[in-house]
Image: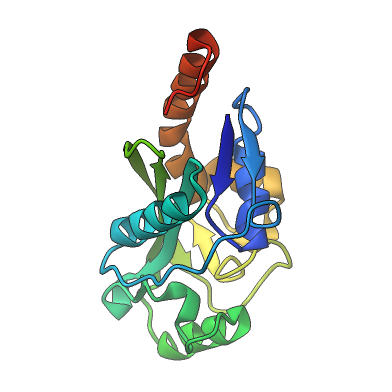
Amino acid sequence: MILLLGTRNNGKISELRALLANVNGIDLSTYRECQFQPVEESGTTFLENALLKARAICAETGLPVLAEDVGLQVVALNGEPGIRSARYAGLSVNYAQNNALLLKRLAGVRDRRAQFVAVSALRLPDGREFTHTGRLIGRIAENLAGEGGFGYDPLFIPDDSSKTLAEMGRVEKNRISHRRRAIEGIKPVLRKLVHEESSGGGRAF
């Protein structure tokens, strides 16, 4: 079963490949093998944006698509940056500027509570859709730390940890991440689709 990952973010692609490695029968494809147009994220929630991307890319390519929307919500900032996480500092994605702006807005703030939210959306050509949400609770560090990961990883410290996500190895991060928790809810669907396709002698969608 071919599954197209509906993202051009190479960091996300790397993590999704690792998280889906134990789903047998899935042939993962990316924008490198199957081009698709950018999708405007005009929704007001993570769920809406994940579905917008999955639906548009599926319609364009005719393939099953796994898309997602991910963001950081900070309690003291009333949930910001939220759905604007990737472009918090402006229209173009710039991790360094996003992190700098977040630290500036939290300067002198003692309440550093935050959570990462990930919504995975699977869209099939026959119109079926499956979604799942994953969350990772933690806090925002006072300073950047770590060279791994991407996005806000150098600033986010999960509960029960003293390290930022960027200080963790890939295996350690993937074991606890919000993306992992969202994908775990999609895996049973993928395994069922693979089984349907293999036992029925044709596409399960």
Q: Is residue 157 left or right of residue 129?
A: right
Q: Residue furthest top?
A: 199
Q: In terms of image quadrants, where is residue 126?
A: top left
Residue 62 or residue 104, whichever sits in front: 62
Residue visible at 47% across and 89% down in the picture? 90
Tell me residue 24's x, y (percent).
Answer: 63, 23
Q: Residue at x 49, y 74 (%)?
A: 86
Is the residue 93 above or below the residue 44 in the image? below
Q: Is residue 28 left or right of residue 135?
A: right
User: Residue 63's x, y, as percent?
Assistant: 51, 42
Q: So how many labels did they put on this image?
A: 0
Quadrant placement of the C terminus: top left
Tell me if I can see residue 159 in this picture.
no
The figure's colour scheme reads: rainbow
Which residue: 41% across, 39% down? 125
Name the residue nearer the viewer: 19 or 35.
Answer: 35
Residue 21, horizontal then vertical, whole percent: 66, 33
Residue 115 visible in the current orientation? yes
Q: Using the image, determine if residue 82 lies above or below residue 115.
A: below
Image quadrant containing the N terminus? top right
Q: Position of residue 112 (x, y in %)?
A: 40, 72
Q: Is residue 49 above or below residue 186?
A: below
Residue 175 lies, with reference to residue 77, above or below; the image says: above
